[in-house]
Image (cartoon, helix red, strand yellow):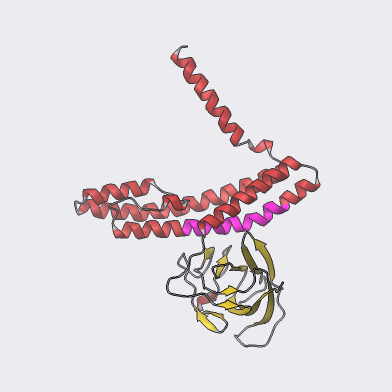
């Protein structure tokens, strides 16, 4: 067989395999294709913006190393720039020989990308679940399966990018119930896991305790906890570190004890909190669509069998 024909056959095989794994948008239901297109556009735009910012920092570091005559560090920074954008933990390790400033820039970039993707996924999972339900009701089983596959993909990725980490030197407390108090403004999630609890801000709302220049702690059973965040700034999307506390039962319920302008203030009416189970997490969703921040005091109770 002539070389040209061999090349053409190989190309046809590759294209055919790619098309089977990535069906064209027109093969999907219109409502699902629209959601996925919006998701891809937002994700690509956000990742691109963060990559450009990180590249600018690394270029400045590279120029400084070149002027200092440090060839090894210059080459290492060049390799680091080739890794951008960093969208998975497997790619987050800096190349050998990268200067300290470049390592910090890469870690900051990875944290921002991971937090952004996790927040975006958290926004689109309920949207895609709604699409799945609509498609199933209309009899489009194939479309519902495609939506379900994307939901599982987004959940798995978010879980991979935001693994709970156990702080060293602290032992978990075992409680039948515990209280959490925090200053909240806008949609916020409190995740309760086997390892402990952590905050997640899926959108652009203020992080707990940081609304409009505030610097308030979260209080767990009255003990002061200042959450550490992956990304600088007082607004999300972002995920905090983990506060170690465990319950005596895997089944939980949440009760709103108080909502007020000031901690220990007079109770106000506010949109009720919601709770759900996501993978092995018990998630308390504080919607708080009303204007202004409020102190929320929640009691998390273990359900006895």
Image quadrant holding the C terminus, namely bottom right
Residue at 52% over, 65% down: 239
Residue 117 seen anywhere in this rendered image of the structure: no
Relative placement, left or right, of 103 versus 208 is: left
Against 170, residue 277 (above or below) is: above
- The x and y percentages for residue 208 are 55, 73
Relative placement, left or right, of 302 versus 62 is: right
Relative placement, left or right, of 100 versus 224 is: left
Against 266, residue 302 (above or below) is: above
**Farthest residue, direction front:** 305
- The x and y percentages for residue 16 are 58, 28
Tell me, yes or no, whether the highlighted magenta stretch contains residue 116.
yes
Residue 52 seen anywhere in this rendered image of the structure: yes
Magenta portion: prevailing SS class = helix
Query: Number of numbered discs present?
Result: 0
- Magenta residues, start to end: 112-130
- The x and y percentages for residue 113 are 48, 56
Residue at 33% over, 46% down: 79
Residue at 51% over, 68% down: 240
Relative placement, left or right, of 90 versus 278 is: left
Tell me, yes or no, whether the highlighted magenta stretch contains residue 245.
no
- The x and y percentages for residue 136 are 77, 47
**Farthest residue, direction right:** 138
| Residue nearest the observer in this picture, 101 or 284 | 284
| Residue nearest the observer in this picture, 266 or 220 | 220
Residue at 51% over, 24% down: 11
């Amino acid at each position: 067989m002539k070389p040209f024909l061999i090349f053409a056959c190989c190309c046809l095989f590759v294209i055919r395999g790619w098309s089977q794994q990535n069906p064209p948008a027109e093969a999907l239901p219109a409502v699902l294709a629209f959601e996925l297109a919006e998701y891809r556009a937002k994700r690509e735009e956000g990742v691109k913006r963060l990559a450009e910012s990180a590249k600018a920092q690394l270029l400045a570091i590279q120029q400084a190393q070149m002027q200092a005559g440090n060839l090894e560090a210059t080459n290492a920074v060049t390799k680091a720039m080739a890794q951008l954008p960093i969208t998975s933990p497997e790619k987050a390790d800096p190349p050998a020989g990268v200067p300290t400033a470049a390592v910090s820039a890469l870690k900051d970039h990875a944290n921002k990308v991971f937090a952004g993707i996790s927040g975006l996924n958290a926004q689109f999972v309920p949207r895609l679940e709604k699409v799945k339900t609509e498609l199933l009701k209309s009899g489009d089983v194939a479309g519902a399966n495609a939506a379900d596959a994307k939901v599982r993909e987004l959940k798995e990725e978010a879980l991979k990018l935001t693994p709970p980490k156990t702080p060293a030197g602290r032992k978990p407390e075992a409680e039948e119930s515990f209280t959490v108090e925090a200053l909240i403004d806008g949609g916020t999630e409190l995740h309760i896991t086997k390892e402990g609890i952590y905050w997640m801000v899926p959108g652009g709302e203020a992080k707990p305790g940081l609304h409009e220049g505030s610097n308030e702690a979260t209080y767990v059973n009255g003990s002061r906890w200042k959450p550490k965040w992956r990304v600088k700034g007082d607004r999300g999307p972002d995920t905090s570190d983990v506060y170690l506390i465990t319950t005596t039962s895997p089944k939980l319920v949440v009760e709103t004890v108080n909502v007020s302008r000031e901690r220990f203030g007079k109770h106000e009416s506010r949109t009720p909190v919601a709770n759900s189970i996501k993978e092995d997490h018990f998630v308390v969703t504080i919607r708080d669509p009303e204007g202004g921040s409020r102190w929320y005091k929640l009691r998390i109770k273990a359900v006895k069998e």
